[in-house]
Image (spheres, rainbow, N blue to C red):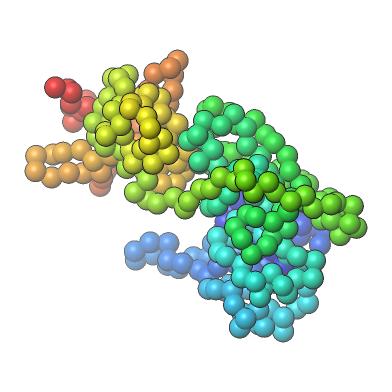
Amino acid sequence: MIIFFGSSSYSIPVLEALAKKEKIGVVTTPDKPAGRGQKITPNPLAQWAEKKNLPLWKFASLNQKTLEKLKKATSFTLGVCCVYGKIIPPCWLNAFSEGILNIHPSLLPKYRGSAPVPFAILRGERETGLTIIKMDEKCDHGPIIYQKSFPLSPRANSDEVYRTLFSFAGTIISSVIRQYRKKKITPLPQNHSQATFTRRLKKADGFVPEKAVVLALKNQPIPFQTAPSLLKELFPRKKTFSPLFLTRLFRALSPWPGLFTEISFGKTKKRLKLLQLENKKGKVFLEAVQLEGKRPVTFSQFSSAYQWPPSLG
């Protein structure tokens, strides 16, 4: 049996492809509440696995105890990891005689870590890719089994890129595993001196100061001190940002955490979600928004109702 590690809807095309040709068991994360007052629902991968009646284990953590539970339930030699979201510890890695193959959406060693596509978009990369490695104890560090580059469209958002890469992974994963098991693939060590790293995205990364939004909509440069914190983190030497950096940030953080700002209503502030932000012929256009506690509307409707954005003074 191949043990599949995953917890995201992005993982499903790979699991679906494997389940057609291999005996598969799935290790995933426990169910979480969908929101306050809502019922607990399983993650999308778990839902899919349950519908297909695949053996399924929902472990809060991977340790010796949970490993023994898996060993008692089934035998296995190979693992495949695809958007799992948790660290696989040495005791688990060593339990797989053929190792665990990890499917990573970047051209390793570039963009190791949990957010490779958003950071590639933010950096303005012209290509990205899919890499399959044999996992070791370090993050995205193991030798390369398979790699393919893809052009990175200047208009694509993170969700679109992830779905493209993992859909492709589903088409080649069985072939890669077959060649790997027959020892027709020689694992290639990564050039660790060229490694770059990404960090986990936070909700706060989507915050854009109101003045930065207003400047962008007026097609004016955004001073460094006014820029969103994630842009300042990635480009600490810039003095100003082009308004189009805001559309790049929007694409990078779609679908999560998305972009939002805060606007003032007298002495109170309310969150305004920027639902659709586009680059049209080199200018920034805000197409749709959602004010805290309200329904989504077009930006023209919102602007007319609230006389926003204000003048820059």
Image check: 75 left or right of 57?
right
Image check: 278 left or right of 229?
right
Quarter where residue 258 is shown: top left
Quick one: 194 or 123, which is closer to the camera?
Answer: 194
- Expressed as whole percent of the image width and height from the top left, the position of residue 147 reads 73, 43
Quarter where residue 292 is shown: top left
Q: Is residue 87 above or below residue 294?
A: below
Quick one: 128 or 144, which is closer to the camera?
Answer: 144
Q: Is residue 155 above or below residue 110?
A: above
- Expressed as whole percent of the image width and height from the top left, the position of residue 60 reads 53, 73
- Expressed as whole percent of the image width and height from the top left, the position of residue 177 reads 82, 56
- Expressed as whole percent of the image width and height from the top left, the position of residue 134 reads 73, 58
Quadrant into which the C terminus falls: top left
Q: What residue is shown at x 59% (from left), y 39% (from top)? A: 161
Q: What residue is shown at x 36% (from left), y 27% (from top)? A: 241
Q: Looking at this rendering, what residue extends furthest in the top direction?
A: 281
Quarter where residue 86 is shown: bottom right
Q: What residue is shown at x 72% (from left), y 63% (from top)? A: 100
Q: Is residue 300 among the parts visible in the rendering? A: no
Quadrant into which the N terminus falls: bottom right
Quick one: 223 or 66, which is closer to the camera?
Answer: 223
Q: What residue is shown at x 77% (from left), y 49% (from top)? A: 188
Image check: 47 left or right of 243?
right
Q: Is residue 288 above or below residue 173?
A: above
Q: Is residue 103 among the parts visible in the rendering? A: yes
Q: Is residue 18 above or below residue 29?
A: above
Q: Looking at this rendering, what residue extends furthest in the front direction?
A: 193
Image check: 145 left or right of 251?
right
